């Protein structure tokens, strides 16, 4: 496994552990599915694409999360990216498109 891949796997595992500690026990890392990938974290009503990269590429990452959400049959895809100098996923950033944010608001508020 490449150093970059190992770094990504560690970040995904940290996110899973963090979510479990925060009261989401059904969370797990998802296996890769090639072109029909469904994100990195399973067990949530949104798709999570985890990123731990030196260079930030928000537009490409959000596009990837959007495609993976469609592949998973859900409306919202987010990118949970590592924040330099911070170890905890709780200190990381979660990024999504405006449309995904509105859909998330609809889901939590019951609005249509």
Image (cartoon, grey):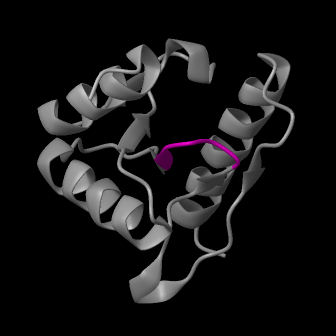
Residue 40 on the magenta span: no
Residue at 72% of width from left, 27% of height from top?
A: 19
Vertical placement of 52 versus 34: above or below?
above
Q: Which residues are magenta?
A: 43-48
Q: Position of residue 25 (x, y in %)?
A: 86, 33
- Secondary structure predominantly adopted by residues drawn in magenta: loop
- Front one among 33 and 8: 33
Q: Position of residue 69 (x, y in %)?
A: 39, 59
Residue at 20% of width from left, 57% of height from top?
A: 63
Q: Position of residue 47 (x, y in %)?
A: 48, 50
Q: Position of residue 57 (x, y in %)?
A: 18, 47
Vertical placement of 39 versus 108: above or below?
below
Q: Residue 64's quadrant in the figure?
A: bottom left
Vertical placement of 1 versus 9: above or below?
below
- Quadrant, the N terminus: bottom right
Residue at 34% of width from left, 55% of height from top?
A: 65
């Amino acid at each position: 496994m490449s150093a970059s891949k190992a770094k990504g796997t560690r970040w995904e595992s940290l996110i899973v552990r963090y979510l479990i500690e925060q009261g989401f026990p059904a969370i797990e890392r998802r296996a890769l599915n090639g072109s029909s990938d469904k994100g990195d974290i399973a067990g949530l009503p949104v798709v999570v694409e985890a990123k731990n990269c030196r260079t930030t590429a928000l537009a490409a990452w959000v596009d990837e999360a959007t495609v993976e959400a469609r592949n998973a049959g859900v409306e919202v895809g987010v990118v949970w990216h590592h924040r330099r100098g911070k170890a905890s996923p709780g200190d990381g950033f979660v990024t999504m498109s405006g449309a995904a944010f509105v859909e998330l608001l609809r889901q939590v508020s019951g609005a249509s």
